[in-house]
Image (spheres, grey):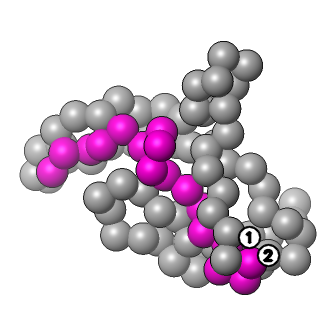
Amino acid sequence: MYWYDPHKNAYLMDEANQKKHFLLKDAHGESIYSGEPGNIAPTTSVVSWFKFPAPPPEVKEVAIILPRCTPCEDIPIEDK
């Protein structure tokens, strides 16, 4: 599998409002995330993280959409 650079294609999907929340950007306009694109061999894994804006307070769950990956749907959002 090839891990694609998510900076343009990763987003949270707010189904309640039908809105996409794209990665936050730093002071230089670069998306805030870790991980580099490249090949992922069978039986291996890759650790990455992504920084998204918070959806509106009424949103209780989102889907995480990453390039060429199955969506992670119905992810609950909890207040801390």
Find residue 12 and report its horizontal and vertical position in percent.
60, 62
Q: Is residue 57 left or right of residue 12?
A: right
Residue drawn at x 60%, y 32% as measured from the top left: 32
Rendering quarter of residue 40: top left
Find residue 52 and report its horizontal and vertical position in percent.
67, 48
* 11 in magenta: yes
Residue at the extreme left: 42
The reply to whether residue 76 is in sight is no
Residue drawn at x 68%, y 69% as measured from the top left: 19
Residue under numbered circle 1: 77
Image: 35 above or below 27 = below
Query: Which amino acid, mark 2?
Result: Val
Residue drawn at x 42%, y 56% as measured from the top left: 66
Q: Which mark is residue 43?
A: none
Residue under numbered circle 2: 59
In the image, the segment drawn in magenta is 1-17
Q: Is residue 34 left or right of residue 25?
A: left
Quadrant location, the C terminus = bottom right
The reply to whether residue 35 is in sight is yes
Find residue 51 and report its horizontal and vertical position in percent.
64, 43
Q: Are marks 2 and 1 in contact (CB under 8 Å)?
A: yes
Q: Residues within 10 Å of mark 2 (few under 14, many from 20)?
A: some
Rendering quarter of residue 54: bottom right
Query: Which amino acid, mark 1?
Result: Ile
